[in-house]
Image: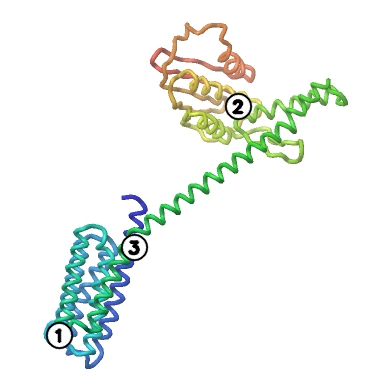
C-alpha cells in the first residue's frame, strides 16, 4: 500500500471514530433525560453503546473489518433494545436517531472500497431502517428519513474521501516535483552564470593580457595573476565553488591548513555526477598543508578517473587512514584489472599525475593489479 492510500485510510478511520463516538454520546445523553424511557432500557442501551464506543476506538487504530462488524452489531443491539419492543413515542425516537442514523452509519465511511464492504453496508442500512420503521409503525416519518439520510451521507462521504484524497495527494506531489525541478534548473543556471563570470574575471582577463603581451602590466604582476588563476583552476578541478569577494577578486582559501574531510566530499560529488559511485571509509577529518592537500586530492582524483575510464565498473572504494606522519588513501575497484608489466612506458598519465605529483610533496604511490582481479592504488602524503 502506497503512502497516499495509508493517509486516506487513516483519515477515514479517524473520521469514523470521532463521528461515531460523538453521535453515541449525544444519543446517550438524550436517552438519559427523565421520562424518555425506563431505567432498565436505559441501562441496556448504554451497555451496547459503550461496547460500540470500544469498537470505534479499535477501528480508529487498525481499521480491520472485524472491528467494523462488531461495532455495527453492538449498535444494532442498542437500536433493537430501543426500537423493537413496541410502539416508540416521540422523545425516545428522537433520542435514538443519532445512534442509529449517526453512530452506526459512521461505519459506512469505511465500507465503500470493495464489493464485500458495500454489501455489508447495504445490509446494515436495511436492518437499521427496518428497525426504525417497526418502532415507529410507519414508513413515512421524519425519523425514517433522518436515519436514511445519515446513512447515505456517510457512505457518499466515505466514497468521496476514498477517491479524492489519493488523487489530490498525487497532484500535490507532482506540483512539489515540478517545483523542485524548476528550483534545480534555476540553481544550475545560476551556477553556470557564476562560472562564466568567474572565468571572465580571472582566466580570460589574464589570457587577454597575454594576447596583448601584457601591455600596461609589469611582468611580476602578470606572473602573480597567472599563478592565482592556476590556483583557482586547481580548486575548481577539485570541485570547490569559490565565492567572489568583489569584482575580479575570488578569495579561495585563507588558512595554512585545510581539512581533508571537507574536500573529499567535493571529489565524491564530482565523480557521482559522472556516474562513478565512490564509497568512503576510514578517517573523516585530517588536516593537511594546502600544497600537500592539492597534490593528494589531485592524485586521488586521477586514480578515480582511471577507474571510471578503464575499470568497467560504476563503483570504487576509498579508504583513508593516517598516523602522526602520513595520510594514506587506498583506492580499490573490482574491475577488469590489467598486467602491470604490460603498461607501456610511454603512457605517462599515472606516472606524472599520481606518482610524481605525490613525490614532489614527499609522498609516494603504489599500484597493484591483475587481470580480472581489479586494481588497488595506495597513495601516501606527509602531514
Question: Image quadrant of residue 325?
Answer: top right
CA–CA distance in space, label 2 to label 1: 98 Å
As measured in the structure, the alpha-carbon distance from the residue carrying label 3 to the one carrying label 1 is 34 Å
The 10 Å Cα crowd at callout 2, few under 14, some 14 to 19, many 20 or more, is: some
31, above or below 159, in the image: below
Q: Determine which residue is flagged by label 1.
A: 137
Residue 27 shown left or right of residue 377 in the figure: left
Image location (x, y in percent) of residue 361: 64, 20
Toward the right, the furthest residue is 216
Distance CA(mark 3)–CA(mark 2): 68 Å
**Along the horizontal axis of the image, is 175 left or right of 63?**
right
**Image point 86% across, 26% down: which residue?**
217
Residue that protrudes farthest toward the left in the picture: 85
Residue at (18, 81) in percent of width and height: 139
**Foreground of the two, 93 or 229:** 93
- The answer to which of marks 2 and 1 sits earlier in the sequence is 1
Q: Secondary structure at mark 2?
A: loop
In the picture, the quarter occupied by the C terminus is top right
> Contact, CB < 8 Å: mark 2 with mark 1?
no
Q: Pinpoint residue 13: horizontal percent, then vertical percent.
A: 30, 64
Neighbour tally class for label 1: few under 14, some 14-19, many 20 plus, Cα within 10 Å: few
Residue where numbered disc 3 is placed: 160
- Residue at 22 percent of width and 85 percent of height: 93
SS for dot 3 = helix
Residue underneath mark 2: 383
Q: Residue 220: image x %, image y %?
A: 83, 23
Amino acid at each position: 500500500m502506497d503512502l497516499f492510500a495509508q493517509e486516506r485510510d487513516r483519515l477515514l478511520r479517524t473520521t469514523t471514530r470521532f463521528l461515531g463516538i460523538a453521535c453515541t454520546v449525544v444519543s446517550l445523553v438524550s436517552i438519559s433525560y427523565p421520562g424518555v424511557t425506563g431505567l432498565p432500557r436505559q441501562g441496556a442501551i448504554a451497555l451496547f453503546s459503550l461496547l460500540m464506543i470500544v469498537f470505534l476506538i479499535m477501528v480508529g487504530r487498525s481499521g480491520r473489518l472485524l472491528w467494523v462488524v462488531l461495532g455495527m452489531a453492538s449498535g444494532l443491539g442498542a437500536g433493537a433494545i430501543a426500537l423493537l419492543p413496541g410502539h416508540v413515542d416521540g422523545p425516545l425516537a428522537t433520542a435514538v436517531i443519532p445512534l442509529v442514523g449517526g453512530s452506526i452509519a459512521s461505519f459506512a465511511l469505511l465500507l465503500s472500497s470493495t464489493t464485500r464492504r458495500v454489501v455489508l453496508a447495504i445490509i446494515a442500512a436495511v436492518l437499521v431502517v427496518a428497525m426504525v420503521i417497526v418502532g415507529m409503525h410507519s414508513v413515512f416519518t421524519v425519523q425514517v428519513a433522518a436515519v436514511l439520510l445519515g446513512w447515505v451521507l456517510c457512505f457518499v462521504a466515505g466514497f468521496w474521501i476514498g477517491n479524492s484524497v489519493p488523487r489530490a495527494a498525487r497532484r500535490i506531489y507532482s506540483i512539489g516535483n515540478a517545483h523542485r525541478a524548476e528550483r534545480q534548473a534555476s540553481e544550475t543556471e545560476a551556477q553556470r552564470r557564476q562560472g562564466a563570470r568567474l572565468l571572465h574575471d580571472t582566466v580570460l582577463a589574464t589570457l587577454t593580457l597575454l594576447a596583448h603581451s601584457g601591455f600596461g602590466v609589469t611582468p611580476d604582476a602578470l606572473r602573480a595573476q597567472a599563478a592565482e588563476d592556476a590556483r583557482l583552476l586547481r580548486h575548481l578541478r577539485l570541485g570547490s565553488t569559490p565565492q567572489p569577494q568583489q569584482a575580479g577578486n575570488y578569495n579561495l582559501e585563507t588558512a595554512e591548513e585545510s581539512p581533508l574531510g571537507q574536500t573529499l566530499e567535493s571529489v565524491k560529488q564530482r565523480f557521482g555526477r559522472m556516474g562513478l559511485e565512490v564509497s568512503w571509509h576510514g578517517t573523516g577529518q585530517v588536516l593537511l598543508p594546502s600544497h600537500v592537500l592539492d597534490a593528494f586530492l589531485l592524485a586521488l582524483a586521477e586514480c578515480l578517473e582511471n577507474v571510471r575510464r578503464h575499470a568497467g565498473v560504476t563503483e570504487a572504494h576509498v579508504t583513508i587512514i593516517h598516523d602522526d606522519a602520513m595520510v594514506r588513501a587506498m583506492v580499490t575497484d573490482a574491475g577488469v584489472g590489467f598486467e602491470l608489466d604490460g603498461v607501456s612506458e610511454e603512457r605517462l598519465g599515472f606516472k606524472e599525475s599520481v606518482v610524481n605529483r605525490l613525490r614532489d610533496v614527499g609522498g609516494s604511490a603504489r599500484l597493484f593489479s591483475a587481470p580480472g582481479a581489479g586494481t588497488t592504488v595506495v597513495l601516501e602524503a606527509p602531514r
